[in-house]
Image: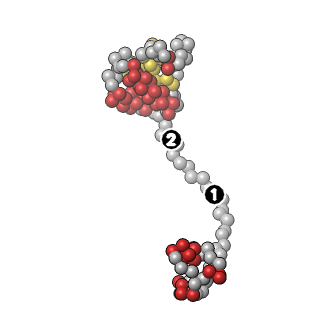
């Protein structure tokens, strides 16, 4: 048995006894050690670990509502931070381009979905982001319109 392929097969144990080259027998183990099988003891009653629930949104301070009028997409944290703290946010997109407005809407929808809140349209370019703990009542027919049809698309 010569060549790299044959030696690799021998090393991996993929050979038949008639293929064994006598010159390479010194690489084979002379004795095979027997190992003891570990006895596995079944675990006793498993105690569940109480992990801290996902950081819950603080109760909304209804004495405060944040109004944000972003100028570009770099203003997104001004929307997310108060909302994450449980404060309702009014997002006025009247000063941004249609492209940036659509990006803000996508961002706000993801934000409210991720924190289990509600995203509602107030006018064509004004939206309300309400945390889960805030209930908004009133005319809901305007809020059911699709955000994708905002700009006549």
Outermost residue toward the front in this view: 2
* SS for callout 1: loop
Q: x and y percent of residue 88 in the render?
A: 43, 24
Numbered badge on residue 23: none
In the rendered image, is residue 61 in sight? no
In the rendered image, is residue 49 in sight? yes
Q: x and y percent of residue 95 in the render?
A: 34, 17
Residue sitting at 57 percent across and 84 percent down? Answer: 21
Numbered badge on residue 46: 1
How many circles with numbers are drawn on the protein? Answer: 2
Crowd rating for badge 2 (residues with CA inside 10 Å; few <14, some 14–19, many 20+): few
| Left or right of 116 on screen, residue 47 | right
Q: Badge 2 is on which residue?
A: 54
Residue sitting at 48 percent across and 16 percent down? Answer: 153
| Left or right of 112 on screen, residue 15 | right
Of mark 1 and mark 2, the one earlier in the sequence is 1
């Amino acid at each position: 048995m010569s060549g790299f392929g044959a030696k690799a097969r021998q090393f991996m144990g993929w050979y038949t006894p008639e293929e064994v080259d006598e010159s390479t027998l010194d690489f084979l183990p002379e004795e095979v050690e027997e190992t003891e099988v570990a006895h596995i003891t079944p675990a006793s009653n498993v105690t569940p670990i109480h992990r801290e629930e996902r950081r819950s949104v603080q109760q909304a301070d209804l004495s405060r509502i944040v109004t944000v009028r972003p100028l570009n997409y770099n203003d997104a944290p001004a929307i997310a931070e108060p909302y994450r703290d449980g404060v309702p946010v009014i997002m006025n997109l009247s000063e941004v381009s249609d492209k940036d407005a659509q990006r803000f809407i996508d961002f706000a929808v993801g934000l409210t979905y991720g924190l289990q809140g509600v995203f509602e349209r107030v006018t064509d370019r004004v939206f309300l982001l309400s945390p889960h703990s805030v209930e908004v009542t009133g005319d809901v027919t305007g809020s059911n319109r699709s955000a994708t049809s905002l700009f006549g698309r």
